[in-house]
Amino acid sequence: MLSFALGVVFALSVYAKYAFPKVSHQWGGGSHQKAIFLVKKEQVEAFGAIGLPVDTSTRRTIPVEIILEGSDFFFVMAAGLPEEQAVKGVRFSKESFDAVYYISGKAAAGVPGL
């Protein structure tokens, strides 16, 4: 019985370390979603001030990894910034955005930083 329990623990550990992070978010996995936010006009300067670059002509952020999405917030990390400029993690209210562009796979391949 002990060997069976150890086998189960080992199998779950391997799954948690190697398989779960690669499984798509849509299938209940742990891979982070990537997105570009369309920031509200009145929020563009504030985003730049905290270190998350926003293109002022399009109001789009650089690509980010969504670490956690709540009912009224996103917790994100910027992707592709040099270490000294990187935003480690920021929580944003969903009210700060007009739209969210979820990107993955082929779409993400054409976006710098992903």
Image (cartoon, helix red, strand yellow):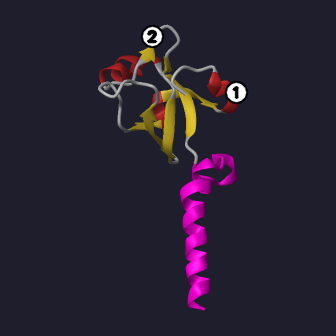
Name the spot of residue 82 as percent of width and height, x first: 37, 24
Magenta-colored span:
1-30
What secondary structure is found at the residue carrying circle 2?
loop
17 vs 111: above or below: below
The residue closer to the viewer here, 81 or 69, is 81
Q: Up-down: is 87 above or below 40?
A: below
What residue do we see at 43% from left, 36% from top?
Answer: 77
Q: Of 77 and 15, which appears nearest the observer?
A: 15
Q: Are marks 1 and 2 in contact (CB under 8 Å)?
A: no
- How packed mark 1 is, by other alpha carbons closer than 10 Å (few <14, some 14-19, many 20 or more), is few
Inspect the magenta stretch and tell me whether residue 28 lies in it: yes
Distance between the alpha carbons at the discs numbered 1 and 2: 26 Å
Q: Which residue is mark 1?
A: 106
Q: Residue at x 54, y 20 (%)?
A: 112
Q: Whole-percent x and y of residue 6?
A: 55, 80
Res. 10 mark: none
> Which is more toward the observer, 94 or 75?
75
Majority secondary structure in the magenta region: helix
* Of marks 1 and 2, the one in the foreground: 1
Please name the amino acid that badge 1 sits on. Answer: Lys
Residue at the disc numbered 2: 56
Question: In percent of the image, x 58 and y 55: which residue is there?
Answer: 18
Of label 1 and label 2, which has the lower sequence position?
2
Q: Which image quarter holds the C terminus?
A: top right
Residue 28 x, y percent position in the rendering = 65, 54
- Local crowd size for mark 2, using a 10 Å CA cut-off: few (<14), some (14–19), many (≥20): few
The number of numbered discs placed on residues in the rendered structure image is: 2
In the rendered image, the residue lying farthest to the front is 3
